[in-house]
Image (tube, helix red, strand yellow):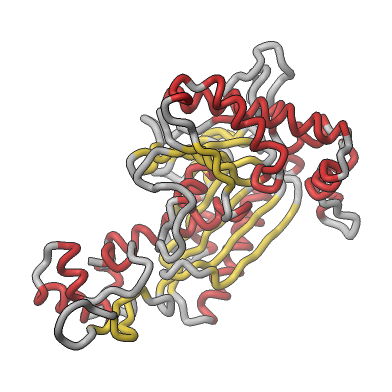
Amino acid sequence: MLTAVTRSSVPVSRADVAARTGLTKATVSTQADRLLRARLIVEGEPVARVGPGRPAAGLSLCGDRVAAIGLEIGVDHLTGCVRDLRGAVRHRAVAVGDHRDRQPAEVVRAAADLVAGLRRDAVSDGLSIAGVGVGVPGLVDTLTGQVLLAPNLGWRRLEIGRPLSAAGDGVGVVVENEATLSALAEMGYPTSRSEPDVDTDAGFVVVSGEVGIGAGVVMDGELVRGRHGWSGELGHVTVDAGGDACGCGARGCLEVFAGQEAILLAAGRAEVVPTVRDLGSARAVDALGELVRAAEAGEGTALAALSRAGTALGVALSSAVNMLDVDAVVLGGIYARLAPWVVPQVERELSVRVLRSRLRPVRVVVSRIGPDAAMLGAAALVLRDVLSAPVPWLVS
């Protein structure tokens, strides 16, 4: 029943829920009363109806009781939030620093501190934390909460679930690839109060670009994780077998052409590539902002670097589209900010390299969520479980 309320952009009546679910009106009324007592839904203003009879009160999700913590562990940042059941971000926290220069245990402790602070903020609002969702740039074991391999962090078989659970006062922790979580956010979870940029029932690929590059895949309205949950490593698709060495050990991967640092270096901006010292002091430099301003001013080196990156991204995405037959690609992370220069190159490569392009062109969409997509998707992963299985939260 909660699904019918969740996936509606406006409050729905009990009669509407019965029609959508096939449940009897009596069953819907009983379940609605239980959810109201549990403060998982609220009853609001009457919903307009067609035909005779009085308007019925509208049901919608309640954001005053249950929330989740979403956390993204990036190469150069930690970003976390408290997100309530309606999808609203109630609190947000950021810690910056280059994690490649730190011991993994130190990064995990910093993440745990962030989670503990967000939990205190949630409790002060009267919210109960249902769990912690974590996005990381690499391959994970979703059952154990272990990061199996994160090349850009230098992590192998690192346990992060238990310390983060302890920081959340013993709540469950789910760990997932950050690009997969970005795709979940693009699908509109936990609510669809604002329409997604793409048809969630169609296939699409979400590209999450930062220091590394990942991709989340959605087919028929469902996340596609692959046999082992490790799909979407777009950054390690080979663009040029004779290219530079990548952190994964191969050569010519997409990341060495279109990753954040690769773009900045190609643009002649090695001095503004973020480091732990820059980001941790008053001398912090907005590296991407510098690049954008240079491109807007028509600086040749900047434009060439962005063209090179967009072309490489388009080549890699063409392979993905030819294999998966998706209808759209969504550019997120740094690519949303660099879209005016990257999108034309991606569209050009898709048009000439994708076999079906003359029959059905592939849409290129710029994400409106921005760099918070993985963090929001991490919280949504927890909230989705609450919405699909609310029994533990019901009161008698």
Give the residue displayed 68% in from the left and 31% down from the top: 310
Q: Is residue 271 left or right of residue 41?
A: right
**In which quadrant is the N terminus drawn?**
bottom left
- Residue nearest the viewer, comparing 161 with 118: 118
Q: Quadrant of residue 78?
A: bottom right
Q: Quadrant of residue 360?
A: top left
- Residue nearest the viewer, comparing 204 with 117: 204
| Residue 203 can be seen, yes or no | yes
Spot occupied by residue 136 in the image (x, y as percentages of width and height): 56, 44
Query: Above or below — where is 386 with respect to 230?
Result: below
Q: Is residue 377 left or right of residue 348?
A: left
Spot occupied by residue 385 in the image (x, y as percentages of width and height): 34, 58
**In which quadrant is the C terminus drawn?**
bottom left
- Residue nearest the viewer, comparing 241 with 116: 241
Query: Above or below — where is 233 with respect to 335?
Result: above
Spot occupied by residue 289 in the image (x, y as percentages of width and height): 81, 50
Give the residue displayed 69% in from the left and 24% down from the top: 246
Give the residue displayed 55% in from the left and 25% down from the top: 351
Query: Above or below — where is 29 with respect to 223?
Result: below
Give the residue displayed 54% in from the left and 55% down from the top: 163
| Residue 103 can be seen, yes or no | no
